[in-house]
Image: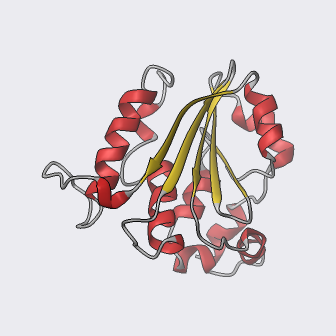
Amino acid sequence: MLLNLTMEEAGDFIESAEIIKQDQVIPGHFRPCRASTYEPGLDWLYRYEQAMLNFLAPKLASHPDDLMGEKSLFHEALCNAFNHAHHRDRLKPITVTVLLGDKGVMIRVADGGRGFNLQKVYRHCRMKRRYLTAAGDGIRRMAESHRYGVFYSHNGTEFNLLYLFEDKLAEQFSDRLAVNLEPCAEAA
C-alpha cells in the first residue's frame, strides 16, 4: 500500500528502530551469476537479493518469500534506481539501509537520481488515466500490497518499504493511504 508517511513517522510505528545493515550496492562490482533467472545485465540484482534474503529471513520469518524475486517490491525499487535514476550505469552506487524495530522492519533504497513527481502519478491514477498501465506495474503492485507499506522520501529518490511483524498494516495506516487504486482498475 502506498502511504503518506515521513521517515520519522515510520520509525515511530516500528518503535526503537536501529540500522542493522547499510550497503553501497555497485552493480559493476558483482560477478556474473549463472544461476540468475533475471534478464542479462541484472546478475548483480539476483546476487544481492539472495544475500539480502539470507540476511532478512530470520527477521521476517512469516513473509520473506515475497520480499525478493522478479515480482517483489524490493526488486522493483532496485531496478528503478538502476534503470531510471542511474540510466543503467553499473558504477553508480545504490544505498540500501535496513532498520529493525520492536514492531517491524523498514528497508530504504536510495539512488542518486533527480527523483520524480509521485503526486503526479497519484493524480493520474485518481483521474483514471492509464499511467500505471502504460508505465509498468511496479507502482500498482506497491499500492495493491496489503503486507508491505511503501512511501517515498527526498523527492522520490528514496523508496521505503515498511513491514509490521503483526501484519496489521491495513488497520494501522487506513487513514494514511496515498492513493486507492481500485478506481484505476476501471481505467485499464
Horizontal relation, residue 54 to residue 80: left or right: left
The relative height of residue 43 versus residue 147 in the rendered view (above or below) is: below
Q: Residue at x 47, y 58 (%)?
A: 93
Badge count: 0
Q: Residue at x 37, y 44 (%)?
A: 49
Image location (x, y in percent) of residue 87: 45, 76
Q: Residue placed farthest to the left in the image?
A: 34
Q: Residue at x 59, y 70 (%)?
A: 113
Horizontal relation, residue 177 to residue 75: left or right: right
Q: Residue 170: which quarter of the image?
A: top right
Q: Residue at x 22, y 55 (%)?
A: 37
Residue nearer the viewer, 147 or 79: 79
Horizontal relation, residue 183 to residue 4: left or right: left
State the quadrant of the C terminus: bottom right
Horizontal relation, residue 41 to residue 90: left or right: left
Q: Residue placed farthest to the right in the image?
A: 175
Image location (x, y in percent) of residue 153: 73, 56
